[in-house]
Image (tube, grey):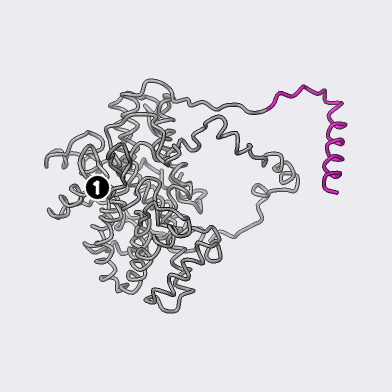
Amino acid sequence: MLKEMPNKFSEVTPEIKKLAEKCSVPIDPSLYERYAVKRGLREDTGEGVLVGLTEISKVVSYVIEDRAMIPCPGRLYFRGINIEDLVNGFIAEKRFGFEEVTYLLLFGELPTEDELKELTDILAEYRQLPTNFVRDIIMKAPSRDMMNTLARSVLTLFSYDDYASDISIPNVLRQSLQLIALFPVLAIYGYQAYSHYHNGDSLFIHKPQANLSTAENILYLLRPDNKYTELEARILDLCLVLHAEHGGGNNSTFTTHVVTSSGTDTYSAIAAALASLRGPKHGGANIKVMQMFEDIKAHIKDWTDEEEVRQYLRKILNKEAFDGAGLIYGMGHAIYSISDPRAAALEGFVKKLADEKGLQEEYALYSLVEKIAPDEIKAKRKSAREVSANVDFYSGFVYRMLGLPAELYTPIFAIARISGWSAHRLEELVSGGKIIRPAYANVAKPIPYIPIKDRTKKSEKKKKEVKKEEK
């Protein structure tokens, strides 16, 4: 186990803190309205500003009736096919769906049996890392953050690729398929190194199996005994499918489009997407849900008492409990209102897994919070907009039941979303053309240049004025 030592490299000195105060002056909020700025590239309704076109996926949360936006149950389409139909299709045929969905996203159509086998064979071949990569890259300087490890590994793969900067479509497709295949390996090996060197756990590195699906390989690589049940593998596969793609406007996918439009290489574009997904506002939401439920369980005596649960949720919304943010995590979505189709697809399987793991009481608590929270949120916000559970509400619970460490929750998201990112990168290269360059209005007032010998006088004058105001 690595011994924690004081790290001068990481120290924020008093001098830095003082300088940081100069960086902490926000822009006047009223200027955003004056210049009609769409903050966060969002319309006043919360919808994203239209900045591009895509054929890869579509999110539906409302219908137009008599020129009015009417909320409807959420729908998600991959290449024009309803995600509900996709999920029902491969589940009914008792197949794993992630590889099939990856083919659909990349190539725009569902694969035949032969085409699906060809893709799975390619992915199996590509799951082998370059010689000594594990020893030289992953085992050295293991990070506490698996997304950092994943991004670093992706950028390092550039050095092993003789055609790393070639952005022709065949070459980018080859790189994309390799990254889709390698993400589970990179993430789990990175976790094993961290777990060994920082936590003192036993180190074991299993080789991926060519005959296993992506979901099966994740469980096989992670567990010391390689064992998993069929239900565990199928529900993890479903999670991968539901996270594989979600429109071109989500932060990490938009990042992929923006960075790709500059003409950069695949490794840099995907590392940028990983940096976006690492943010807690994007990829880390399910961890917050898990932490919130641990807090709820610790403070509620009777998990079945609806009134007791309701009162505690009110405390959370009033910033009197949990993290003080006033948010019930996992409830509500930027686009969906009545329902998130991904959460709806996942919920039934969550119950089955809870039954298998003997966690029926905890599942009942989740269901109770899902029932109560929307009304409490609407009452607090004094809003008529419907609120429902999003996919993150249940996914963290699923990952915990599968025994996945919290450090891998966001990397699992990345393992799924790399398929969508790759499809969008290819689409941008084929159809984009122009570098994406939005405008920012400069609202700083012009000031004169002051010679350096006169700046001290000005600084002292300013300090006197501040002290005078304070008095």
* Above-or-below relation of 118 to 310: above
Q: Main secondary structure of the magenta part?
A: helix
* Location of mark 1 (residue): 98
Disc 1 residue type (three-letter): Phe
Q: Quadrant of residue 172?
A: top left
Q: How many marks?
A: 1
- Which one is nearer the viewer's eye here, 351 or 136? 351
On the image, the x and y values in percent for residue 293 come to 43, 66
Residue 410 magenta-highlighted: no
Q: Secondary structure at mark 1?
A: helix
Query: In the rendered image, is residue 91 in sight?
Result: yes
On the image, the x and y values in percent for residue 332 come to 40, 53
Task: Decide if residue 25 is on the left or right side of residue 353.
Answer: right
Task: Decide if residue 448 is on the left or right side of residue 142.
Answer: right
On the image, the x and y values in percent for residue 182 come to 34, 44
Q: Quadrant of residue 347?
A: bottom left
Q: Quadrant of residue 58?
A: top left
Task: Decide if residue 258 is on the left or right side of residue 321.
Answer: left
- Which one is nearer the viewer's eye here, 205 or 330? 330
Q: Residue at x 33, y 61 (%)?
A: 398
* Above-or-below relation of 398 to 168: below
Q: Give the extent of the magenta segment.
A: 445-471
Outermost residue, front side: 66
Q: Residue at x 17, y 52 (%)?
A: 88
10 Å crowding of disc 1: few (<14), some (14-19), many (20+): many
